[in-house]
Image (cartoon, coloured by chain):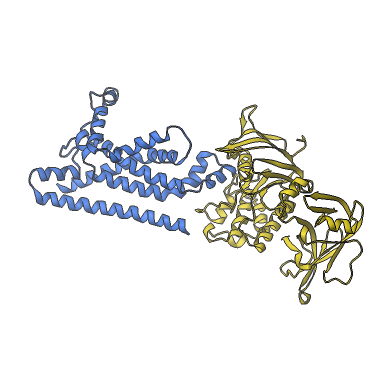
Amino acid sequence: MIVPIVLFTLEIAAASTLLILVPGVAVAWCLSRRGWRGRMVVETLVSLPLVLPPTAVGLGLLLLVGRARPVGGWLYQTFGVDIAFTWRAVVLASAVVAFPLLVRSARSAFEEVDPRLPAVARTLGRGPLGAFFAVELPLAWRGIGAGAVLAFARALGEFGATILVAGNIPGRTQTLALALYQEVQLGRDREALELAAIAALLAAGAIAISELLVRRREKTLAE
Amino acid sequence: MSGSSFFEIAVRLRQGSFDLTVEAGLGEAAAVLGPSGAGKTTLLEAIAGLRRSAGRIAVGGEVLQDSATGLFLPPERRRLGYVPQDGALFPHLSVRRNLLFGRPHPTAPGDEDVAHLVATLELEPLLDRYPRHLSGGERRRVALARALLARPRLLLLDEPTAGLDPLRARKALAGIRRVQGELGVPLLVVTHQSEEALALASDVLLLEAGGVRGAGPARQVLRAPSALAREAGRHQENVIAGTIVQHHPEGGTTEVRINGGEAVTIPHTPDLLEGSEVLLSIDAEDLLLATSRPAGLSARNAVAGEVDELIAVGTSVYVAVGPWLVHLTPAAVEELRLAHGVRVWLVAKTHSWRVVAG
């Protein structure tokens, strides 16, 4: 019973990380540039899920993607796709909550790139996108990687937003964190502890990888 | 601004409280000279298209930007070889990949100009290294080659010797002059040293905080009384080209034939090959004037010339003798009866000479 839950949790975390990777890097790059209107607004919106109670985020998502709600209703009528209380809602909740972690890490990585480097790339004939892929992205990838791993770890443990928008349906939306909660509710402490131990292992692994990436980046920069 | 200028610049640069209007026409070898904070780098970035500025910039007859018509070529379409201070090499790429970064077809055959430039700038042993393992001088050479290999229509150099020790600095200037001579590529160099401006450029744009102090042929601009007054208390360098004739290690000297035919002795500089070209400099303060050929002096150098003009600046007089500028007091001018056309000998100690490039 534990293995499918762990696998499902890993899949969900991986899917939500992949989902936010490209938009997260794009937003991080924009935030690393100075001097454009609305930067503060975007910055605040992006960081909001970090400080809001996850249950509030979940409630907000539910109001958006529920079958009777604007976005959810449109999706259901147009594509026949349900979001709320399916695995998609689990991915969505994890993605939204993990997004700021990726953006923050990627953004500081972009800020550490010497702005003259993409400028020189431009004078050597690369367009803005060319300079981004040839210079900025390779120089910032460790920071982006570290952010992605952090986002993945955050998604692994997501609980509050998920339970509101996806419920706690065994076999359908039940992740490790949700299963743990259920076991405690049912008074099955031993099973709950097992799940907690696995969660701790997964999280520790992810944090270690993230630290490793950041440290090697600092070493490269220091040289 | 003359229509035949290679660089035609008429821009207004603004950033916060910084506001600089530049209007100048300059020839194919130009220097922007001024103290730090005068906006030199800002101007360079504007020419490169890395900074938006109002106005018009044309190079070699092609308009790069013009607010009147709304034209603004992005940097990648200006084809200018921008070499920022300290080179700004891509740290994640080897020297080889840095060099080929701007090539339209990195693997195209017949890249003999790559090989040629690598040889000229002595880059062969560096090709597989990474920028973090290069010295300051090596980084700049790589950056110069990288810019040239993108086949730019001109070079933009920002303080090409800043932070280099005197030996590396003169090697760097010699390298740039070699490239300039061989490839005939026009350049615009930004510097705070008039020595460097004179070494690389024939035209100078003299900037000062808030504005242009002068623009035109280098000697003319630098000899304007206002320019000399600005430099008051600072050294006025005479920069002159020459050829190494012979080394005299036992005498501690090296003999250099300066353009014009006269030989001068400079401190022994064994790394310069006999027959190679050098640029020498000497401060206007370190030159003596005599109205007859001097004899019985320890100074080893006496160059004959004629007084062109006397430039009075405050309590100083600068005496122009051909390419030379000599700093005297009004009393000395009086005593020697110096005036236009008077025959004089310039006298200098061996150790007053410095090698600027070589």
In which quarter of the view is residue B338 placed?
bottom right
Question: As rendered, which of A38 and B222 lies closer to the eye?
Answer: B222
* Direction from residue A53 to residue B323 in the image, left or right: right
Q: Position of residue A128 (x, y in %)?
A: 52, 39
Question: Residue at position x 49%, y 53% from top?
Answer: B92
Question: As rendered, which of B66 and B229 lies closer to the eye?
Answer: B229
Q: Where is residue A81 in the image (x, y as percent from the top left)?
A: 26, 28
Residue B212 shows up from this direction: yes
* Direction from residue B80 to residue B341 in the image, left or right: right
In which quarter of the view is residue B53 placed?
top right
Residue B358 shows up from this direction: no
Question: Residue at position x 62%, y 61% from top?
Answer: B124
Question: As rendered, which of A120 and B351 lies closer to the eye?
Answer: B351
* Direction from residue A213 to residue B247 in the image, left or right: right
Q: Where is residue B109 in the image (x, y as percent from the top left)?
A: 62, 50
Question: As rendered, which of B236 and A151 lies closer to the eye?
Answer: B236
Q: How many numbered callouts? A: 0
Question: Residue at position x 19%, y 45% from top?
Answer: A176
Colour seen for chain B: yellow
Quadrant containing the C terminus of chain B in the rendered view: bottom right
Colour seen for chain A: blue
